[in-house]
Amino acid sequence: MSNVTRVTENDKSQDGDDPTDLSSSSQSQLDNEIKQNQKVKKRHKNSNTIKSNSKTESNSYVSIESDSEDDNLKKKRKLKYKNRSSGKEIETITLISEESDNGTDRHTQQINQIDLDTTDVSNGSSSDDEGQLRKAMAMSLQPFSDDDEDIQHKTQPMASKLGNLKKGEKLKSPIRMMKSKNYEKLDPTCNEDAVSLHDLIGSPDLISTYQFDMMIDCDFILPHITADPLNLDIFVIHNGEDLNLKPEHRLMFKITPIKMICAGYGSHHTKMMVNFYKDRTAQIVVHTMNLTEMDYHGQTQMCWISPKLHQLKIESLNDEKNKENQLKKQPDFKIDFINYLKKYKKIEIDQLVQDISMYDFSPIKAEFLSSAPGKYEINLENNDINNKEVLFGYGKLYQLFHKHSLTIDGANCNRITKFVAQISSIAAPFDSNSSNIFTHILNPIMAGNKEIVLQPGLQSVHNAMALHKYEPVVIWPTVDEVMNAMFGYLSGFALFFQKERKFNNFSYKNQYAVLKIFFYRWGSKNKNDLGLSGRKFVSPHVKTYTSTSNEFENVNWFLLTSANLSKFAWGAPARGYGAKGDARDKKTIHKYEIKSFEAGVLIHPDLYKIEGEGEAGAETGSVVELVPVFGSDELEDNFNNIINDIKGEVVKVPIRFPYDIPLTKYSQGDEPWDAVAKEKAIASANGSTSLI
């Protein structure tokens, strides 16, 4: 069993020009508003629970004295709660796990109280504090009780319906909406097919989970876990923020914290889960939320859930030839996923690499597009279509788009194509001038432009738009959209953008001059319209990128990711390889550097080609289209989204959208929500934070 470790990490990691997520103070403020205005149910109903004194918490720790099994195969764990300074025992707790009548594990606890001196002079804590802590632990170690429907009404996680494609199977969107229970008060149908946090981590069969995120509130997520704590390993990979873990939760759960501190202004911004179950299956979840109550209840979030993955046949791996054939059948997702995990260079993640390598990824219909800190090179001579180079960020985007002919030039599109970025943070220009990562690097890559990096300014953007027939679109909430959202100005705390900056830093102002003509609203203009997506009045924390050449009748591809418009997330050209760079090998290779960890999944039509039995390996006559859907994960019945083998048939794959169409461009009176608007809203707040 893993050691139970004390987790009190107070180090803060600066997110620099890409402050995608909220500070702890902002989080606390919005959490309070959510609880007050929307009456969010408390996770712990026991009114007798006494919170531990912070002085006691900081001067005590948990020690595992023994792990054992008795003759009746009851698993026992003895833990001693000790004073950190003196080493004096405060409490001994024995957790016992046994098999119940219905075959599931249950656990009880035996608490042996230890006599305490009236006062411990070494740390200044009183016996009253220790007594309160003892009572708190005794009650909190009982199985969680909660009348939250998310926690009680389901016992199994939702698996993606998109596993092995079978003839006659009806397709559902691989991109899922996270539940917004508060929004049901406005729109009772808004959560159709939506996913709850309990769906992701609430299975009683969960035996191990890896939680990758920037901010994690353990006391918020742990009540969603129903698996036996004695048989569950929890690995928390985070950015260095305080994990907010109560002493009783430290005792009950085996939690291994892994703190990732990135150089410069980089951050561990990935939002992902890897879960393992009793039946030896595994599941990967890529999502967009910090694991906090604020992010879960107060913002628009989405996720991608892999099918349940099964282990490769061990006997086939013993034969080298069979092993080689098995690995050849594995999709690029597995290779890219493992390459990403290796970038952590942590013992616990190395073990995850070994474990997940034994699983069959062939049911996955997605590409893994991630970012990891480091310096990389793109081979421009062959477009890196053979995946010879291990790339991340915009280099991986370049690689995937050329390999699967997703660029405008590769698709031979003759119509105007919209490149759409819907994000929650727009950072500083990557060249300290006016060049935004979206308009000056990502768009040229998506279009198939010969030069990866455009010259600074707006003229180069217009030239590329005319040459390749595309239009950039940036979906960003206006001031009135934020103020009319569910939590008023508090809804804008997770939206980061600066039109200008103090101390005469003109780069932000210059960047806005380039971007403002491409700004579109988050929802429709009509205030009485609840919107197609069911999230019009829930500010976005989701990040999506897509393109369409026919006003969203279908989309060419779709990317769900944690990456905002930031050079730290996507990368920035190395010195000499920018638009004005003079590196000697600039025409054959492109060098760039990434600062942050990010994770996303790319969906494109080639992933859904129907496998055939001939040498071609696919029904080349079938056409696959990705079609936007709103309010549910399925297309209407009159659409053909059923897999069959009729050559020439159009198969439609639904993709759930978080925002409304048709898109609404900013009008003359619209202003983007930015740092100045946030300051004004806070200053003028008169006690009411919701305008709806």
Image (cartoon, helix red, strand yellow):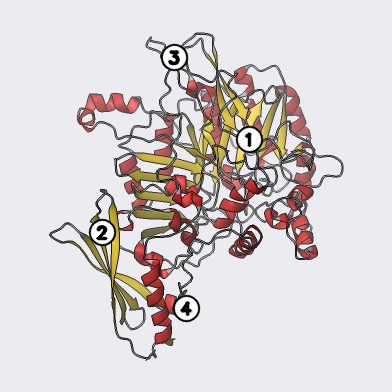
The residue identified by callout 3 is 618
Query: Could you tell me residue 383's position as x and y percent?
Result: 53, 26
Disc 4 versus disc 1: nearer the observer? 4
- Label 1: few (<14), some or many (≥20) within 10 Å? many
The residue identified by callout 2 is 97
Which badge, 2 or 3, is on the more N-terminal residue?
2
Q: Secondary structure at mark 1?
A: helix
Q: Residue furthest right?
A: 668
Where residue 179 sits, quadrant-wise, is top right
Q: Secondary structure at mark 4?
A: loop
Q: Residue 53 bears which disc, if any?
A: 4
Is residue 382 in view from this perspective? no
Q: Residue furthest left?
A: 71
* CB atoms of marks 4 and 1 within 8 Å: no
Q: Height in image: 660 above or below 254?
A: above
The residue identified by callout 1 is 442
Measure how far apart labels 4 and 2 are at the Cα level: 29 Å
Q: Please state which of residues 350 and 143 is positioned toward the viewer in this rendering.
A: 143
**Which quadrant is home to the N terminus?**
bottom left
Which badge, 1 or 3, is on the more N-terminal residue?
1
Q: Amino acid at mark 2?
A: Ser
Q: Secondary structure at mark 3?
A: loop
Measure how far apart labels 4 and 1 are at the Cα level: 51 Å
Where residue 253 sits, quadrant-wise, is bottom left
Q: Please state which of residues 486 and 397 is positioned toward the viewer in this rendering.
A: 486
Which badge, 4 or 1, is on the more N-terminal residue?
4
- Label 3: few (<14), some or many (≥20) within 10 Å? some
* CB atoms of marks 4 and 3 within 8 Å: no
Disc 4 versus disc 2: nearer the observer? 2
Which badge, 4 or 3, is on the more N-terminal residue?
4
